[in-house]
Amino acid sequence: MATDPQTDHLPLAGRPLVGPLGHPRVETIGMLGARSVCILLLIAAPFLLNDFSLLLLTEILIFGLFGASLDLLIGFTGLPSLGHAAYYGFGAYVAALFAMHVMDNVVLALLIGTAAGAISAALTGWVTVRTRGVYFLMITVAITEIVYSLAVTWTDVTGGSNGLTVSTPMLVKGLALDSRQSVYWYVLIVVIAGYAFVRAIGRSPLGRTLNGIRENEPRMRAIGYSTARYKFAIYCVAGAVAGAAGALGVVNTGFVSPSDASFTTAALAFIAVIVGGSGTLYGAFLGAIVVILVRDEFSTLLPGRSTLVLGVIFIVAIYLFPKGIAGGLHQLRQLLQRLVRHRRAGVSDND
């Protein structure tokens, strides 16, 4: 597929959905093949991995969905939030409380957690999206700290520092998610649906409008767009998806604690988006692989230094790979396409 020099300099989220001659951009066979391989590997995972590795993969999927919701703000709208964990944690707590005191049904808990994330984002977002730069960052940090403090101090509801433990989740009456494989299948289905949802938003007219706001908000206002409303809308959508991810986290571990709503969780999601490649959505999953493996696996090799390693990775990614892992893969694909075209041109000349 030929590249367009007029758009190749743009961030991946800012590229139009049409080619240089007005034809829709089509996915290459290589891209479709790569996605097919990923889907096949995810399907085969329960048959190839032990329970601990499957738990880790499930956590990566959930954190990737959480990161994709944050990417709607960072990569598409230009809102670098450091407080997105507030909605993840709020959705997790509400889903856990619903399962403990109302009805033990993972589907209803998922819907309740999603609604909780959306409502909490709506309550805080109308003021938040009207700020910019460092003020936006500080307000989002403050929101996370407030939710974290409530989770620690409101012990009668949240369990305080001990958190809440949820019993074996029920899919429907009489059918429990009582094995690591069943939890994985449930999470995988929801994550695929969630990713399809955020991807549809990114490729929609709304996504292009958000790109315009990110690139030049004053110009978008000048031509009649109510940019604050668009930012508020995507802020609520991102909060809803984060709440859904929080509800999935409860199903995966059977536990929720104040750390789920902490600044550390928000910072890890931020790192995952930047390292994976902001503005791509799938880059959040690539970044989640790095973050979760370093945090959970390398911590045994480097006790107490996993945060330091993540910080080094973040700095290296910014300076050497500004477009993240996804951007590097995109550039590699373009290089391979050019080599193939040159080779074909050489063969044609020889003929």
Image: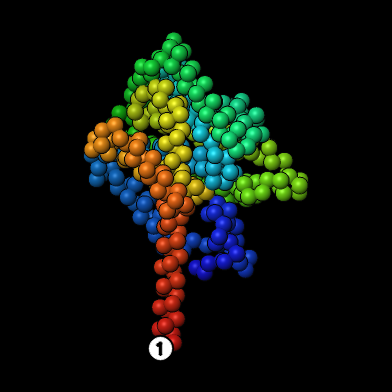
Q: Residue at coordinates 56% horizontally, 34% vertically from top-left?
A: 137
Please, is residue 157 above or below residue 25 in the view?
above
Residue 91: percent from the left, percent from the top?
Answer: 48, 27
Residue 88: percent from the left, percent from the top?
Answer: 47, 30
Q: How is the image coloured?
A: rainbow
Say which amino acid is labelled 1: Asn
Q: Residue furthest top?
A: 156
Q: Residue at coordinates 65% horizontally, 30% vertically from top-left?
A: 126
**45 with respect to 317 (left or right):** left
Quadrant of res 74: top right
Q: Residue at coordinates 28% horizontally, 42% vertically from top-left?
A: 46
Which residue does the numbered mark 1 point to in the structure image? 350
Name the image quarter holding the C terminus: bottom left
Please, is residue 338 above or below residue 231 in the view?
below
Would you say residue 283 is visible in this rendering?
A: no
Residue 20: percent from the left, percent from the top?
Answer: 61, 67
- Disc 1 is placed on an element classified as helix
**Labels in figure, total:** 1
Quadrant of res 37: bottom left
Would you say residue 4 is visible in this rendering?
A: yes
Q: Nearer the viewer, residue 298 or 289?
A: 298
**152 with respect to 8 (left or right):** left
Please, is residue 289 above or below residue 266 in the view?
below
**347 with respect to 15 (left or right):** left
| CA neighbours of label 1 inside 10 A, class few (<14), some (14 to 19), many (20+) | few
Please, is residue 270 above or below residue 339 in the view?
above
